[in-house]
Image: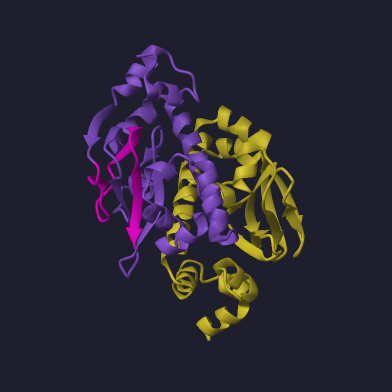
Chain colours: A yellow, B purple
Amino acid sequence: MTHHPLKKHIEEIIKLTDEEFEFILSHFETTNKRKHQYLLQDGEIADKEYWIVKGCLKSYFFDESGKEHILQFGMENWWITDYESFVKQSKSKINIDCIEDCELLYITFENREKLTKEMHKMERFWAKKSKFGRIALQNRILSLLKNSTKERYELLLEQYPKLFHRVPKKLIASYLGVSRETLSRLYS
Amino acid sequence: MTHHPLKKHIEEIIKLTDEEFEFILSHFETTNKRKHQYLLQDGEIADKEYWIVKGCLKSYFFDESGKEHILQFGMENWWITDYESFVKQSKSKINIDCIEDCELLYITFENREKLTKEMHKMERFWAKKSKFGRIALQNRILSLLKNSTKERYELLLEQYPKLFHRVPKKLIASYLGVSRETLSRLYS
């Protein structure tokens, strides 16, 4: 139990006793999804937040012309949900699909509210996670406004080198907001 | 004291007694800045978070060609700082300037840490504010990836109609990432 990957992950921010971690873990469920299966569709309410034990996912949405735009990728140790839909319990604007077979832990909205109330350490953990998430989004906006496609490609490569071995180039292009052909010119 | 605008603002999220609010307010200082004066320059550490009592501000950064990009506007009842620099106490990438004469309340990083520890209500208040901030940023990214300039212009007009009377068109163009001329074609 001490070496559970989720315990290690939470302990990057707060220290836990084994008992505390067992209590936290009792609020989670496990699920396995196969490549191409989905976790969330736009129009649904995101009632779960997932923690990725193994696998790779994408969250994405369609513009009015039906073109797919990637909002976020997810890999091991990352959390994934539609944050707005989950927090507000409102209809989601985005979709989440598995790019690989995935092993996931999830916590429901109710259990997360309960755990936040019952355990101040977890309230602090999620507050901190939320801060970091906000900072990452702010940097993505700065990058979208400031950097060329080439610079954003290089930044992504630098931050997440593993992503390039696991994710089809078509999806990388969709994340960067360019065509597959434009991307080919950048990395060839 | 009961009718202080900051009390009203905090009470949109959590209820406070007058004593609690006075305790909170004792952690803030007041400052007045004139139009064109700055609150933060890139390279500095953001050691204060500001709450806008009166006035209008912009946070912005320069790209490598020296072009200005607006990250955020701020008006009455909004909080403004470089969130990343403030949270991490790292060097800021952005600037914050007054577009009008401004009356501001601010809390230092140390006082905010102190107040968060001392008062669970304020920990919850800021956690909630951070959640909403993260959601707003996510929606800005969705909009940047998905919407045309015209759509983003209309969205801004719909969300913040007052902004258009207070902020020069040049700055609206810079927020939308287009030239002053392109913007003229949109709103004429």
Query: Residue B35 at x, y = what percent?
Result: 25, 42
Q: Is residue A92 left or right of residue B139?
A: right
In the image, residue B105 sits, relative to residue B176, either above or below, namely above
Q: Do we see residue B179 in this rendering?
A: no
- Residue farthest toward the front in the current orientation of the protein: B188
Total tally of numbered discs in the picture = 0
User: Quick check: A1 above or below B183?
Assistant: above
Q: Which residues are magenta?
A: B35-62
Viewer-nearest residue: B145 or A138: B145
Give the vertical position of B125 relative to A81 (above or below): above
Q: Is residue B83 left or right of residue A5?
A: left
With A169 as the anchor, is A145 left or right in this view?
left
Residue B173 on image: x %, y %: 42, 57
Q: Work out whether B36 lies above or below A159.
A: above
**Magenta stretch: includes residue A78:** no
The answer to which image quadrant residue B118 occupies is: top left
Q: Is residue B50 magenta?
A: yes
Residue A52 x/y as whole percent = 63, 55
Residue at the spot 65% in from the left edge and 61% down from the top edge: A58
Q: Where residue B16 appears, x then y in whole percent?
A: 44, 17
Relative to B95, B83 lies left or right:
right
Residue found at x 47% / y 70%: A152
The residue positioned farthest toward the bottom in the image shown: A188
Question: In the rendered image, is residue B158 in sight?
Answer: yes
